[in-house]
Amino acid sequence: MKVYAEDLYRNETVKVGTVFVYRDMTKEYEVDKMKSEFVSTVSHELRTPLASILGFTELLINRELKKERQLKYLSTIYGEANRLTLLINDFLDVQRMEAGKQTYEKKYLEVLSILRKIVDNQKVNAIKHKITIKSDLNQAIILGDKLKIEQAFTNIIGNAIKYSPEGGTIQISIYEETETLNVSVKDEGLGIPEGESAKLFNKFYRIDNSDRRKIGGTGLGLAIVQEIVNAHGGKITVQSQLGVGSNFTLSFPKLSMEVQTSNNKEYTQ
Ligand code: ADP
């Protein structure tokens, strides 16, 4: 089609062609999907403990109950309130990490004693499990932020317990490789379907199948562990077989010989 200058000067609408604008919506779609997963996870995960707190409080207020029963209900309320606190902390942690506002205060840490303490704390959740800790090293030291490292180990050991509903042995091992000091947590639980392993570290990602639907969670635990481990110059890997079990390994940069063999007892336990 020919376009004449006088048509343009006359300010008339002249169609000279069509411009197609293509926009890749994949990113927008992914963000929308994440937002809706977030909303449904948050509402489900916050509602469940809240409903139980409200229900038990109502019973305590409206019924004449024996002391023993009152204590039982109070301890459920306490447990659920604790669960809410942990959830909210997870949400806040993720937000802080995403905003790049998470700070790390690193000190030399003795890994074995940290793991022993975590295993002790987790024993109430691990009634059907046997948890062992094996170390190849006299002293396993890493440079890390104590609370964050504890949080990372707690999430991994907590998952090993949670996703082994039938029990079994959970074997924690500390060992060295050329460049790294590794902590692996091996369970005999549900395992992970092929092709899903890489996605587990995405925020809010949960494997959705009938074995797991009853097991609560936010899909944030492993994303948080990955952030923490990365911030320490390390990495997390997983090997797993569905129905057989999983082995999560956290690797940290190995420290110099002087630090490892030093008798300086100023390690944070
Ligand atoms: P959450 O446990 O809150 O769902 P995580 O980020 O910790 O979130 O884990 C993501 C998913 O990875 C879980 O939903 C679970 O299906 C799977 N998973 C994590 N750890 C294990 C494990 N030790 N064994 C089997 N599946 C696991």
Image (cartoon, rainbow, N blue to C red):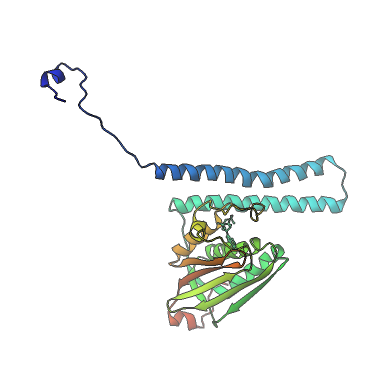
Q: In the image, 58: left or right of 44?
A: right
Q: Position of residue 17 (x, y in %)?
A: 22, 29
Residue 52 image offset from top left, x and y in percent: 72, 46
In the displayed structure, would residue 223 be above or below residue 114?
above
Q: Is residue 1 above or below residue 219?
A: above
49 to 18, vertically: above or below: below
Rendering quarter of residue 111: bottom right
- Say which of 159 and 209 sits in front: 209
x and y percentages locating residue 40 in the rendered image: 58, 43
Q: Residue at x 16, y 25 (%)?
A: 1
**119 lies left or right of 174:** right
List x then y, in percent, for residue 184: 55, 71
Work out which residue is located at the far left of the displayed protein and give it: 5
Between 92 and 191, which is closer to the camera in this rendering?
191
Q: Nearer the viewer, residue 136 or 268?
A: 136
Q: Considering the image in quadrants, where does the C terminus appear? A: bottom right
